[in-house]
Image: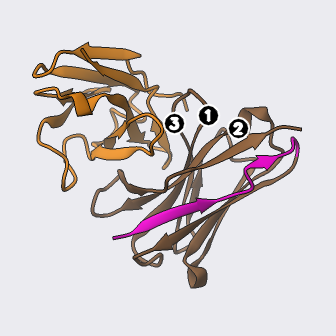
Chain colours: A brown, B orange
Amino acid sequence: QVQLQESGPGLVKPSVTLSLTCVVSGGSISSTNWWNWVRQPPGKGLEWIGQIHQSGNIDYNPSLRSRVTMSIDKSNKQFSLKLSSVTAADTAVYYCARGTVQTPFGMDVWGQGTTVTVSS
Amino acid sequence: QSALTQPPSVSGSPGQSVTISCTGTSSDVGSHNRVSWYQQPPGTAPKLMIYEVSNRPSGVPDRFSGSKSGNTASLTISGLQAEDEADYYCSSYTTSDTYVFGTGTRVTVL
């Protein structure tokens, strides 16, 4: 059973670059899956950030594309998100999620989420 | 890309049926059968309930069903149960190879 676990700094100052990591356990990261980042500001809805494939193909949300970088580390079975020039508007719970051919265009496994607060 | 439009809330008594709509455009919901639905109880991560408009992952009760007509997708919960109380989000893959989520709907069991 694949499990995902996010990790991050918790609290970051405005204008810095936020870095988050998602570790994949119980399964392969190098399969026909897409690995996604989704965030949820307090009391608000879900926002898709982007997805990365083990082949290196990446798609980003157009509204965040200029600030987002995603990467994958197959040897350590993890993928990462970097979000630059953060502001209070980036305060959210950040989730990683799997997109798989078993449930096309649906994300079937989610991490528990990591809370990121942007504040000076 | 703009968020898909969902009603803020729907409610029903136990045993009743409720339907949540999800309206997009010809660039997302209306383009292909690439709509999914997620359930999110308070304080928890989303859970996939429906993919490709009407398919249920293993373990999801058949009380949950999905459909689509034009640019609007729908999720129906039949035989509403107390445990179904949660926020529900639709999502669509777009013609730009991105995902967009709906605005979310709070389901209340009266």
Of A81 and A94, the residue lying toward us: A94
| Residue under pointer 2 | A91
Horizontal side, residue B64 vs residue A26: left or right: left
Q: Are marks 2 and 3 in contact (CB under 8 Å)?
A: no
Q: Amino acid at mark 2?
A: Thr
Residue under pointer 3:
A46
* Residue drawn at point x = 53 percent, y = 28 percent: B2
Amino acid type of the residue tagged 3 in the rendering: Leu
1 or 3: tag closer to the N-terminus: 1
Observer-side mark, 1 or 3, equals: 1
Please rate how many residues cluster around mark 2, counting C-alpha atoms within 10 Å: few if below 14, some from 14 to 19, many from 20: many
Give the Cα separation between the discs numbered 2 and 3: 13 Å
The residue under the point 15% across, 44% down is B61
User: Mark 2 and mark 1 in contact (Cβ < 8 Å)?
Assistant: yes
Q: At x 30% / y 22%, what residue is drawn?
A: B21
Q: Is residue A61 visible?
A: no
| Crowd class of label 1 (few under 14; some 14 to 19; many from 20; radius 10 Å) | some
The residue carrying mark 1 is A41
Is residue B105 depicted above or below B56 in this figure?
above
* Residue A90 x %, y %: 72, 38
Residue stretch in magenta: A1-15
